[in-house]
Amino acid sequence: MTKTQAYEAILRHHALLGERMEERVRAVRQAVDQVPLGQDGHHYEPAVAELVAFLGDEILPHASAEEQTIYPTAAAQEGLTEVVDQMIGEHKRLLSLTEDLASATSGFAAAGMSDEIAELFVAHVGRENDVLLPPLVADDGVDLAGLLSQMHDLTEASHDAEQTEQAEDEFSALRLEEDLLSVFLQAADDLARVGEGDRACELAAAAWRKLRGVRPDLAVRVTAALHRLARQSTSVAVTFRNAADGTGAEGQLDVRTLAPAKRHEMIFAAFDGLGAGGAFVLVNDHDPKPLFYQFEAEHPGTFSWDYLESGPRTWRIRIGRIEAGSFR
């Protein structure tokens, strides 16, 4: 890349940044203008967030890269020291306005700061294009293409650092969820040990319901804990029916040959397929007491649970769907 090509590439990039800036500032203005006179809603906030993200992801890293490459070279040119100082000051002002915009408490204030940011950027880029860069192009001792390459590397490094930081934050959030669950399960164990096993199971089942869609790995941990806690609970109604009542027209779901991780999934799928008044007989190789608490959390008031056989090697439970609020 020649020096002239590097200069033209910088001008094109500045023009592109200006267009993208104006697009986002215009979106803020339009969002604020939609609010009736004398009122101030919050529907402008997504547009403000988009502008702040653009400034943080594109404009400010670009400014930082300029201060480490082009600006020191320009400051060495005769007559440009004060111009460079002014432009660094404008970068600081841009950062300050971005921080203020991110915490704007009204649409009117957000629109005003957005307009000021746009005006500052236009004036700043114009000064860089017309005053700062031409002397560098004219100086045979300046490698403008090399400076542009350095800027690109610094900007990419900034983006990589942001992505790494974001990944680390996400990992930390996941670890925090795991640590909080450990504390929660320890508290449930303590609750069960002082005679509140039923309540411990109810709370664990509620946690399982919250986690099963977003953190299935943690939901599995809760299911395992439920099996432990259920041994210390007493609230499952062990209502026995005549064995003949659970056979015949009703289907039988034997999960004894399935992997434990698949059993609850299949049982809930079978229940979801029932119409009102329908039922099936669950056959298991242990008392599925933890499942009862999960049904309580997932389908409160809409299921029946009746033991047909209770061990010692086989358990058979009739699980039915009832109308909400009906006597079970």
Image (tube, rainbow, N blue to C red):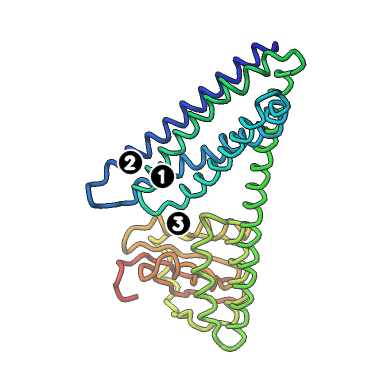
Task: Out of 207 and 74, give the one closest to the viewer.
Answer: 74
> In what element is the residue under mark 1?
helix
Residue 100 position, x and y percent, is 48, 49
Residue 205 position, x and y percent, is 51, 69
Q: Give the total of numbered labels.
A: 3
Task: Out of 230 and 207, give the one closest to the viewer.
Answer: 207
Q: What residue sits right under mark 1 in the picture?
A: 46
Nearer to us: label 3 or label 2: 2
Task: Out of 261 and 162, give the one closest to the viewer.
Answer: 162
Query: The N terminus lies in which quarter of the figure?
Result: top right
Q: What residue sits right under mark 3 in the picture?
A: 270
Identify the residue at horizontal 54%, vertical 78% (top origin): 200
- Is residue 31 positioned above or below 237 on the image? above
Name the amino acid, label 2. Ala
Q: Is residue 210 left or right of residue 105?
A: right
Q: Residues within 10 Å of mark 2 (few under 14, many from 20)?
A: many
Q: Earlier in the sequence, mark 3 or mark 2?
A: 2
Can the viewer see residue 196 in this picture?
A: yes
Q: Are marks 3 and 1 in contact (CB under 8 Å)?
A: no
Q: What residue sits right under mark 2 in the picture?
A: 31
Q: Earlier in the sequence, mark 3 or mark 1?
A: 1
- Is residue 251 positioned above or below 302 on the image? above
* CA gap, disc 3 and disc 1: 43 Å
Q: Are marks 1 and 2 in contact (CB under 8 Å)?
A: yes
Name the amino acid, label 3. Ala
Q: Residues within 10 Å of mark 3 (few under 14, many from 20)?
A: some
Task: Out of 13 and 157, give the one closest to the viewer.
Answer: 13
Identify the residue at horizontal 61%, vertical 30% (top origin): 83
